Image (spheres, rainbow, N blue to C red):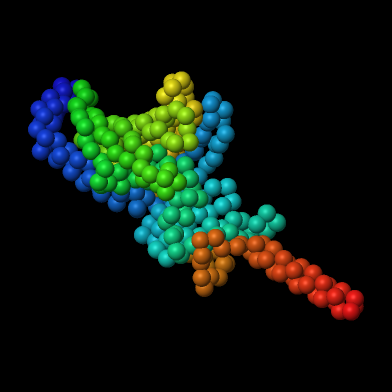
Amino acid sequence: MIFKCIIALLLTFLLKNTALSGEIIHQIRSGLLKVSEIESNLGTYECQFKKTSRGELIRDKKIVIKRNGNGVIFSIDNKIFCLNSEMMFYIEKAKNNNDWILRQADRVKPESTFRNNLAEMGFLVYPLTSTVGWERLNEIIDDSSFTETSNSVKQDGLIDLHFKSEIRKPIFNGPLNRIGVMTVSPEMDFSVVKWEETVKYPAVSFPIKYVCTRQIEKLDGVIRCKSIQVSIFNMDSKNVEGTESVQFIPGENRPTDPGEFFLNYYGIPIPNDAPEDRAGKYGWWWIVGGTCLTMAIGFWYLARVHNNR
């Protein structure tokens, strides 16, 4: 405890120097690179994901994630979402047999489509380097709008870094201001252990505050995420609008089969083209059936016109 207090006093002194304060940002970037490398080689791991809305449990799912140099697989229920170096695909197991059905494939914008499919569960793929949903910490820090406004060192040695930046997404028709604070741990390679931000969205009448707390540990020199807790607040009423919690299931990370990251592993031929929304196995039957029905109506109409002449 005494050692931590000494470190805290030393960091407080150093952070008063603006140049050295910028060095902390550099340390955070370096730390993100290290833990990002850890994330990309996690192998197979499981977690329990729970989501509530105004106190009501609306999702409680066990999720399996597989990662290696070939990409990432996200499995939930009987669905698999995969992102590899060539494409993104989404497959689902048929209810009447064990066949896999191709629901979606995309070579044009694979990462974007992968993110859209996972929505708010995206941070499970990057448990150490994401904020809320899909946003990556390095994307926020490296953005030109990111500005450090102040900082302070706590008694436990953690550093609070206050900042402001912008959220830029086409659906908002312009940038949105965000104000927040990230808490980093020098002992954990400057990993972000807590993230808070307040945002005012055009379609929402009240400002929303997100608080993301990450419990991490270092085992044999390797940083691991034990749990993540997200709370979403209505800043007008101060009420909790919703929560998301993740418990990573203890156990040794298992190696993955490289074939699992490619369609032919599941008995599905690789499509010649993969637009953003590709019809699945049953989707093609609907297309063929619809075409036949249209042709039948056309022939019936021509025959009727001919008989009326």
Given residues 258 and 84, the one toward you in this image is 84
Q: Residue at x 20, y 29 (%)?
A: 151
Answer left or right for 185 relative to 102: left
Residue 211 location, quadrant? top left
Q: Is residue 108 above or below residue 77?
A: below
Answer left or right for 100 relative to 220: right
- Quadrant containing the N terminus is top left
Give the residue furthest to the right. Answer: 308
Residue 122: percent from left, percent from top: 44, 45
Residue 134: percent from left, percent from top: 41, 45
Q: Residue at x 21, y 35 (%)?
A: 148
**What number of labels is visible?**
0
Residue 11 location, quadrant? top left
Q: Is residue 129 visible?
A: no
Q: Residue at x 57, y 34 (%)?
A: 58
Given residues 139 and 83, the one toward you in this image is 139
Given residues 94 and 167, the one toward you in this image is 167
Q: Is residue 12 visible?
A: yes
Residue 87: percent from left, percent from top: 45, 63
Residue 214: percent from left, percent from top: 35, 34
Q: Is residue 140 above or below residue 237?
A: below
- Quadrant containing the C terminus is bottom right
Q: Is residue 97 above or below residue 303?
A: above
Q: Residue at x 36, y 59 (%)?
A: 69
Answer left or right for 167 relative to 286: left
